[in-house]
Amino acid sequence: MTAAVAVPGALDRVLLSVFGFDRLRPGQAEIIADVFDGHGVVAVMPTGAGKSLCYQLPAVVLGERGGITLVVSPLIALIKDQVDALVARGVAAAALTSAASPEEQRAILDGLRAGKHTLIYVAPERFRSPRFVDALESVQDRLALIAIDEAHCISEWGHDFRPDYRQLGNAVRRLKPARLAAFTATATPEVRRDIADQLAMSSPRIHVRGFDRPNLHYAVEPVGGAAEKSARLVELVRLREGGAALVYAATRKNAELHASALTRAGMRAGVYHAGLGDGDRTRVQEAFMTGKLDAVVATNAFGMGVDKSDIRVVIHADLPRSPEAYYQEAGRGGRDGKPTKCVLMFNHGDGRLQEFLIDASYPSAEVLRAVWKLLRETPAFGRHDEDGALEGRLKGKLPGDPHASTIGSTLRILERHGLLRNDQGGWVAVRPDPEVYPPLDVESLARRAEVERSKLKTMMDYAYWSGCRRQFVLDYFGDAEWSDRGKRCGACDSCEAIAHGRPTGLGEAEVKAIRGLLLLVGSLNGRFGRTKLAAIANASDDDARFDELPERGCLRGWSARDIMDLLRALEGAGLVEASRGEYPTIDTTKKGDQVAVGRIDAAELGVRMPTGGGKKRTRAPKKRAKFDR
Ligand SMILES: Nc1ncnc2c1ncn2[C@@H]1O[C@H](COP(=O)(O)OP(=O)(O)OP(=O)(O)O)[C@@H](O)[C@H]1O
Ligand SMILES: [Mg+2]
Ligand SMILES: [Zn+2]
């Protein structure tokens, strides 16, 4: 065929006539060309960069020649929006999700065979159905493209792994589509490799494009307690320049709290989280999109596919779980290209809340087994009655006294793997049908928890980072242009502080603490990890080897946690360095040694002192009710 010559003209024509755009955005052209030419493509572009067009445009052109494009997307709501938009443009697109009745599903599959559809959107769990895969096989010769959206979901190392995505590798191997492309907004280099491996792409073309969003200004603001946080939140929303504010919270409860702080201050604020009914959520989203709200306060349930152009400030009122989540959520701001602020309000305690949430979402193998066994042996335990009663009944009978929200995630995980059925009367323990459910792999769950913990740690490092914030994040995502630690963007709080030579506000005592700790670290020659260093620094360790060490006890009275925070802050400022590996040890850098001996003034370096400031924390963290999103 002479398709290769005919392609560009057809693409241009369709770009304008169907999509109404006069040109492609940077990055799109190269990706589309590779998709067209049949190279395996992994394309990483940030939110709002226009990934959909990279498969929709080829799909429409291929469709004119009878080709079918299959799009895999994880969320029914996302699928619906895209299909509606395509249909409104006159493209024959259809959605095959569990939201469709069996008759509708059959009709769509028949339409597929009859050549009525150009694009079919499917949720990944469709691939569990042998009937569906058979239907695809029957149109295999016309399968022009399989596009996998939100492709990071295929990787355990990604931030949103979905077991159902794992089946895509087999499906692709069976269907052998003429073209295969994967898209995501957030993939570190290792996730990109994993995507290509899972999908068995040989020599994939990897595109990492447009990650830098120059109109976004990044800042981290340390905040003390809840009252300070609310006050600052109100101020940030009030001081925004036009448009609306998007506020992210870590939990439903916090979302409600932050929203009521805004409402009390006279702002028009809405709440959005998965605990609200569909009607409420739609109403809030509508009001936000049409400019009737100053702010929406949301959990991470909000946002996928939100395309409001004039969000002028994105505030993370609580620490997000991963740099991926942070960058994606912050990236919803400023889509019109105008200056927009992204502020992370940071309190070290927020890290512990996220740690708790991670623990709760990954129950141990023992708890998983014990819950199933209990419900199997005593079906009455599973009955539905008032909220929380089930957790109460199970709690005392489970190993390790798990938190109610851990039991909640246990039930969800067992259900997802076909080990529990949520019947009218209650939860019933069953044996899964292996044809229908992915096997429950407890080791994979444990690995996922580790990945999440390490991402959270990176997020903490970001908060304590005193170098350029943009450099930190873009380097994390593998943008080669930003791999130099010394590179500065000039448009983040750190760069501004450095440029203005703004004093960091470190007092004499703080400088002394920093120097003492650096001397201690330096004299131990990188032999120990953070925990041991903290114990020597506050002299809680009675290891006789260090009795003679002059720096032992240099931070007497500090909590171990605060010392470890300070070590992180010093790491962020490039004064100490952690070795790689499972048990990292800490050593000083050259610069750190110079600060230690007073040749460089610590007060000039922008070291962020931990919010605890070295004071002993005596109050235990308050027990919290529910943490579900
Ligand atoms: N070449 C273009 N010219 C003008 N507008 C475009 C172009 N390509 C895409 N857009 C618009 O950009 C917006 C964002 O596109 P899209 O939803 O595909 O982003 P995305 O990269 O998939 O983001 P997300 O990660 O949030 O899903 C849409 O409104 C789309 O119509
Ligand atoms: Mg998209
Ligand atoms: Zn910067």
Image: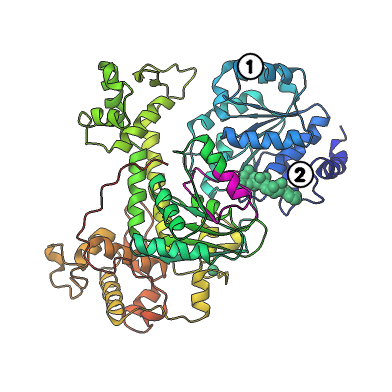
The residue that mark 2 highlights is 33
Marks 2/1: CA distance?
A: 30 Å
| Mark 2 secondary-structure assignment | helix
Whether the magenta-drawn stretch holds residue 289 is answered as yes
Residue sitting nearer the eye, 187 or 282: 282
- Give the label on residue 255, or none: none
Q: Residue at x 34, y 50 (%)?
A: 353
Whether the magenta-drawn stretch holds residue 339 is answered as no
For residue 129, what is the image quadrant?
top right
Q: Mark 2 packing: few (<14 Cα in 10 Å), some, or many (20+)? A: some
Question: Viewed as shown, does residue 216 lie left or right of 85?
Answer: left
Callout 2: CB less than 8 Å from ligand 1 = no
Q: Reply above or below: 624 against 100.
A: below
Residue sitting nearer the eye, 573 or 413: 413
Residue type at numbered disc 2: Ala
Query: Can you say which quadrant of the picture contains the N terminus?
Result: top right
Q: Nearer the viewer, mark 2 or mark 1?
A: 1
